[in-house]
């Protein structure tokens, strides 16, 4: 789906029927996309060992059931980060790497 219509922010659940969120994160990170995808992983899991598993490529981890304001704040952070990445992209492409 993301190949047909790329996005800058991906809000996904950890547990899904066909592919879990960790696998989705790894798949997104393995993709050689032209722009960065910020991944926010949602889960009912709230143990410290679960939070540490965002090494799969998620940028942030949020336990479900929290305040909606927290989700919106984290999405705003994602928007700001992807905006900065997008604005730096021409310099990265022009120089062949980070300046």
Image (cartoon, rainbow, N blue to C red):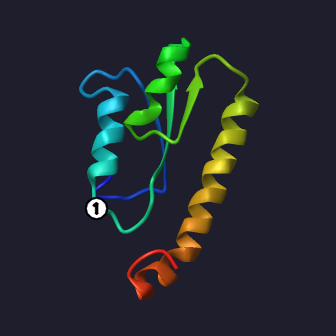
**Residue at the far left in the pictured view:** 18
Kind of element beneath mark 1:
loop
Question: Which image quadrant for residue 87?
Answer: bottom right
Residue 78 at x, y percent in the picture: 61, 50
- Residue 42 vertical position relative to residue 48 in the rendered view, above or below: below
- Residue 11 vertical position relative to residue 2 in the rendered view, above or below: above
Q: Which residue is more in the foreground, 44 or 17?
A: 44
Residue 42 at x, y percent in the picture: 51, 27
Q: Can residue 1 be seen in this view?
A: no
Residue 50 lies left or right of residue 33; in this view the side is right
**Residue at the far bottom in the pictured view:** 94
Residue 51 at x, y percent in the picture: 52, 23
- Residue 53 vertical position relative to residue 74 in the rendered view, above or below: above
Question: Which image quadrant for residue 66?
Answer: top right
- Residue 70 vertical position relative to residue 32 in the rendered view, above or below: above
Residue found 71% across the figure and 28% down from its top: 68
**Residue occupied by mark 1:** 32
Residue found 61% across the figure and 57% down from its top: 81
For label 1, the crowd category at 10 Å Cα-Cα, with few meaning under 14, some 14 to 19 and many 20 or more, is few
Question: How many discs appear?
Answer: 1
Q: Is residue 36 visible?
A: yes
Residue 78 lies left or right of residue 51; in this view the side is right
Residue found 58% across the figure and 19% down from its top: 64
Q: Which residue is more in the foreground, 85 or 19?
A: 85
Residue found 48% across the figure and 16% down from its top: 49
């Amino acid at each position: 789906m993301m190949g047909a219509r790329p996005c800058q922010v991906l809000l996904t659940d950890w547990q899904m029927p066909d592919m879990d969120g960790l696998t989705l994160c790894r798949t997104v990170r393995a993709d050689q996309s032209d722009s960065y995808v910020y991944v926010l992983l949602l889960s009912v899991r709230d143990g410290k060992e679960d939070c540490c598993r965002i090494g799969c490529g998620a940028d942030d981890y949020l336990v479900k059931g929290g305040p909606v304001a927290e989700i919106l704040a984290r999405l705003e952070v994602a928007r700001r980060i992807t905006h900065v990445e997008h604005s730096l992209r021409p310099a990265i492409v022009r120089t062949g790497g980070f300046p």
